[in-house]
């Protein structure tokens, strides 16, 4: 009878030890794989030569997600969500240049190099992002600089870089070639918050 009681106590002890270990590993994996996201990121571009009317647009519904444990980042935006001040520009952009009915979205998938969420401060810090930018179904490897900082319950990401229209087979007619720049300036500003 004494041996049986001892066996039951060991069983309960092992069960409690296993349960504690499982809970610890589960909580650790959740905390270490925290993701930060937004569905209201601001992406804008300027695509005109300085001497002519400015061609610019803003997309305020860009989606972005950052994995705090790895620095992996993914961005998705719908081309038709770019808003222009002049509606005719918006129509030409979607129909003639971007063919947004055939290529409705642009994506970016990459990694923030040497990223550590714990090292982020309330002031901006420079990082490099390596990844693949896909526009009009064409993928290009890119390397861009960005600035990150900690904000309440999340992080802020800002970047400003240029892409060549020719790299993504965006054809600019001769008639407007002196008005539209071959180099398109892209500006992104995202405040990402804990994804629960």
Image (cartoon, rainbow, N blue to C red):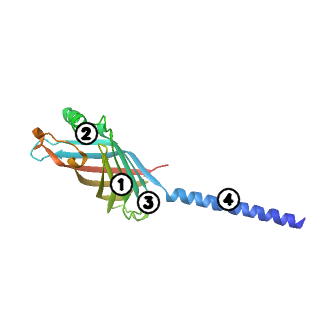
- Give SS at disc 3: loop
Assess disc 4: are there few (<14), some (14-19) or many (≥20) residues with their C-alpha within 10 Å of its C-alpha: few
Taking 73 as reference, is 5 above or below it?
below
Q: Earlier in the sequence, mark 4 or mark 3?
A: 4
Distance between the alpha carbons at the discs numbered 4 and 3: 28 Å
Q: Nearer the viewer, mark 2 or mark 1?
A: 2
- Give SS at disc 2: loop
Q: Nearer the viewer, mark 1 or mark 4?
A: 4
Q: Nearer the viewer, residue 166 or 48?
A: 166
Q: Earlier in the sequence, mark 3 or mark 1?
A: 3
The location of residue 196, given as percent across then percent down, is 50, 49
Q: Earlier in the sequence, mark 2 or mark 4?
A: 4
Tell me if I can see residue 38 in this picture.
Answer: yes
Assess disc 3: are there few (<14), some (14-19) or many (≥20) residues with their C-alpha within 10 Å of its C-alpha: some
Distance between the alpha carbons at the discs numbered 2 and 3: 33 Å
Pointer 4: what residue?
19
To which quarter of the image does residue 125 belong?
A: bottom left
Tell me if I can see residue 152 in this picture.
Answer: no
Asked if marks 1 and 4 touch (Cβ < 8 Å), the reply is no
- Give SS at disc 1: strand
Pointer 3: what residue?
70
The location of residue 52, given as percent across then percent down, is 10, 43
To which quarter of the image does residue 79 belong?
A: top left
Distance between the alpha carbons at the discs numbered 2 and 4: 55 Å
Pointer 1: what residue?
156
Taking 105 as reference, is 91 above or below it?
above
To which quarter of the image does residue 2 belong?
A: bottom right
Residue at 40%, 65% in the rendered image: 119
Q: Earlier in the sequence, mark 2 or mark 3?
A: 3
Pointer 2: what residue?
98
């Amino acid at each position: 009878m004494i041996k049986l009681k001892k066996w039951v106590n060991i069983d309960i002890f092992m069960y409690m030890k296993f349960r504690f270990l499982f809970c610890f590993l589960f909580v650790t994996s959740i905390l270490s794989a925290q993701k930060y996201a937004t569905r209201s990121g601001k992406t804008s571009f300027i695509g005109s030569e300085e001497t002519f009317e400015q061609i610019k647009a803003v997309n305020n519904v860009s989606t972005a997600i950052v994995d705090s444990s790895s620095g992996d980042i993914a961005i998705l935006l719908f081309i038709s969500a770019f808003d222009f001040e002049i509606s005719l520009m918006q129509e030409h952009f979607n129909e003639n240049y971007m063919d947004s009915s055939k290529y409705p979205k642009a994506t970016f998938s990459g990694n923030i190099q040497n990223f550590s969420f714990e090292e982020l401060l309330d002031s901006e810090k420079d990082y490099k992002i390596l990844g693949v930018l896909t526009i009009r179904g064409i993928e290009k490897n890119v390397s861009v600089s960005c600035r990150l900082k900690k904000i309440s319950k999340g992080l802020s990401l800002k970047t400003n870089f240029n892409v060549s229209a020719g790299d993504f087979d965006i054809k600019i007619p001769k008639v407007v070639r002196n008005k539209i720049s071959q180099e398109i300036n892209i500006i992104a500003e995202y405040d990402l918050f804990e994804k629960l």
